[in-house]
C-alpha cells in the first residue's frame, strides 16, 4: 500500500528536486519506405512518421496533466537512413534529412533521430553518401539528429570512419559557425551503439526493434543528490543502497508513464532508460552528486571511483524496478548540460583526460564538450578513436559529442541555450596524432569478442 508519506515524497521530487520524464520517444521502422525514386521515398518517410506519431505529443501532454509528471520532450527515432535510402538512385541524401525535419515539425516533436549509419566494420555506398551529407543536413535542418557507429566489441574499430568523422565535425562546425557550431551538438559518434536508446542526439530505431515502439527516458540527478544529503559521512555501503532505493522509485515512475503511453497510443512498450541526465539548472547536476560523496570538486582524485559507484547503483536500482530497463541507463556526464561540470571545467579541475577516464565507468562518453575552433580534424578523430577503444575493450557503449567551436579559444564560453546549456572551451593536447589517424584500416576486435 502506498502511504501518504511516499506520495508527498514523490510530489517533492517533482516540485523541488527536478525529477522529470526527460523524453517519450516513439521508434518507427522506415524499412518499408525504401524506393528507387528518392522523391517517392522521402514522401513515404514523411507520410509514415506523420501517421504513426500524430498523437504522440497530445498523448504526452495528457499524461503530464493527469498524473502531474513533467514530460520535457516528445521525440521520434527512425531506422538508420543509410539503410532506407540505399534503394534510391541518388547521390545526395540531404532531401531525406529535410523530409525528417518536415515530419518532425508537422507532428510537433522536439527532435527526430536516425539520420545515421552503422559502419563499425566497413562502409556500404549508402553509408558513404549519408556520412558525406551530414554537415549540410545538420546545417539546413532544425530538429534532425545524426549518429554514426564506428566501432564495436565484435567488429573492432573502423579507423577510416574515425578519420572521416573528424573531417565531418570540422565541416559541420563551419557550416553552423553562426550558432557556435551547434550542428555538432546534434551529432554523436558511437562505439557499441544500442538499438533502443530514447535519448538524443544518438537515438535511432534498430532493425531488431518492432514496427513501432514507445520508450521513456527518465532523469533524476536532483533526487539522488537530495537523497545523499540525508546520509552525510556514512560508509559507501549506505551510499550505494541509498542510490539504489532512489533509482528504484524513479524507474517505477518511468515505467508507469511508459505503460500508459503505450496503452493510449496502441504501440508496444519498449524500455525505460534510467539515465541521470543533468540540466544547467542548479540542483540537477551529476557533478554535485559526486561532490556530495566527499569530493571537493568534480574532477579531483577519486572522481572516477565515485562515478563508478553511482553508475552501478543506478543500474541495480533500475533493474529491481522494471524488467524492461534498456537504452543507455546510467549516469551521463555532458559538460555543457551540467552546472557542476561547467564550474569544475572553468576552475581547471576537470579536463579532457579526466573526462576520458570517467567514461570508462559512466553511461556513455565525452558528451557536449567544446574545444578550440582551430582543433585539427586529426585531433578530433584521435579523441573519437580513444573513446571507441574504451567501448570496444570494455564491452560498453561509448560516444563522442564534441564541438570545435569556430573562432573560440580556451577559456571562452559557447552558448547553446535550453537543455544544452553553455560549454567552456577546453584545451586539447598540442601534439599531433595525424600519423596515427592517417594509417586507416581497422583496429581488430579484442579477444573478448570471441564468445561464440
Image: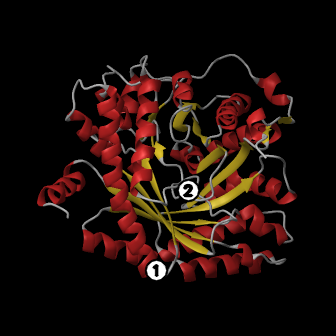
Residue 293, percent from left and from top: 31, 27
Residue 164, percent from left and from top: 77, 41
The front one of 408 and 153 is: 153
The front one of 350 and 305 is: 305
Q: Secondary structure at mark 1?
A: helix
Residue 144 visible in the shown view: yes
Q: Is residue 348 above or below residue 274?
A: above
Q: Is residue 365 above or below residue 80?
A: above
Residue drawn where x is 25% and y is 26% of the image: 234
Left of 402 or right of it: where is 344? left
| Image quadrant assignment for residue 240 | top left
Judge the density around disc 2: few (<14), some (14-19), many (≥20) Cα neighbours within 10 Å: many
Q: Are marks 1 and 2 in contact (CB under 8 Å)?
A: no
Residue 117, percent from left and from top: 73, 55
Residue drawn where x is 55% and y is 33% of the image: 359
Residue drawn where x is 67% and y is 35% of the image: 384
Residue 335, percent from left and from top: 45, 35
Tag 1 residue? 265
Tag 2 residue? 197
**Structural distance between the alpha carbons of marks 1 and 2:** 19 Å
Judge the density around disc 1: few (<14), some (14-19), many (≥20) Cα neighbours within 10 Å: many
Amino acid at each position: 500500500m502506498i502511504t501518504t508519506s511516499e506520495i508527498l515524497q514523490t510530489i517533492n521530487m517533482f516540485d523541488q528536486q527536478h525529477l522529470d520524464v526527460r523524453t517519450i520517444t516513439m521508434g518507427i521502422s522506415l524499412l518499408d519506405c525504401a524506393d528507387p525514386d528518392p522523391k517517392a521515398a522521402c514522401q513515404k518517410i514523411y507520410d509514415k512518421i506523420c501517421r504513426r506519431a500524430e498523437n504522440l505529443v497530445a498523448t504526452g501532454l495528457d499524461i503530464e496533466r493527469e498524473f502531474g509528471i513533467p514530460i520535457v520532450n516528445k521525440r521520434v527515432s527512425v531506422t538508420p537512413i543509410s539503410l532506407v535510402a540505399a534503394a534510391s538512385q541518388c547521390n545526395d541524401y540531404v532531401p531525406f534529412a529535410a523530409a525528417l525535419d518536415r515530419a518532425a515539425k508537422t507532428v510537433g516533436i522536439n527532435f527526430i533521430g536516425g539520420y545515421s549509419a552503422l559502419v563499425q566494420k566497413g562502409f556500404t555506398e549508402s553509408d558513404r553518401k549519408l556520412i558525406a551529407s551530414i554537415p549540410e543536413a545538420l546545417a539546413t535542418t532544425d530538429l534532425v539528429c545524426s549518429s554514426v557507429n564506428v566501432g564495436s566489441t565484435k567488429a573492432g574499430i573502423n579507423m577510416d570512419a574515425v578519420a572521416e568523422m573528424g573531417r565531418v565535425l570540422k565541416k559541420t562546425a563551419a557550416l553552423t559557425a553562426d550558432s557556435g557550431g551547434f550542428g555538432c551538438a546534434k551529432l554523436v559518434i558511437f562505439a557499441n551503439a544500442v538499438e533502443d536508446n530514447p535519448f538524443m542526439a544518438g537515438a535511432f530505431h534498430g532493425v531488431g526493434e518492432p514496427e513501432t515502439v514507445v520508450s521513456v527516458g527518465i532523469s533524476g540527478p536532483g533526487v539522488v543528490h537530495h537523497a545523499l544529503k540525508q546520509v552525510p559521512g556514512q560508509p559507501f555501503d549506505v551510499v550505494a543502497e541509498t542510490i539504489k532505493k532512489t533509482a528504484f522509485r524513479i524507474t517505477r515512475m518511468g515505467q508507469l508513464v511508459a505503460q500508459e503511453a503505450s496503452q493510449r497510443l496502441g504501440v508496444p512498450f519498449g524500455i525505460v532508460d534510467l539515465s541521470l541526465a543533468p540540466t544547467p539548472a542548479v540542483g540537477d547536476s551529476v557533478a554535485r552528486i559526486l561532490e556530495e560523496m566527499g569530493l571537493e570538486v568534480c574532477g579531483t582524485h577519486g572522481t572516477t571511483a565515485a562515478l563508478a559507484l553511482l553508475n552501478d547503483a543506478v543500474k541495480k536500482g533500475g533493474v529491481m524496478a522494471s524488467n524492461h530497463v534498456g537504452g543507455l541507463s546510467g549516469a551521463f556526464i555532458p559538460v555543457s548540460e551540467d552546472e557542476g561540470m561547467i564550474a569544475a571545467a572553468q576552475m581547471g579541475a576537470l579536463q579532457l583526460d579526466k573526462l576520458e577516464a570517467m567514461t570508462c565507468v559512466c553511461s556513455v562518453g565525452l558528451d557536449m564538450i567544446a574545444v578550440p575552433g582551430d582543433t585539427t580534424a586529426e585531433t578530433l578523430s584521435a579523441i573519437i578513436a580513444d573513446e571507441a577503444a574504451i567501448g570496444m575493450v570494455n564491452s560498453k557503449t561509448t560516444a563522442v559529442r564534441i564541438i570545435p567551436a569556430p573562432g573560440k579559444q580556451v577559456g571562452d564560453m559557447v552558448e547553446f541555450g535550453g537543455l544544452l546549456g553553455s560549454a567552456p572551451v577546453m584545451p586539447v593536447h598540442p601534439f599531433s596524432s595525424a600519423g596515427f589517424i592517417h594509417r586507416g584500416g581497422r583496429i581488430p576486435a579484442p579477444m573478448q569478442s570471441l564468445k561464440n
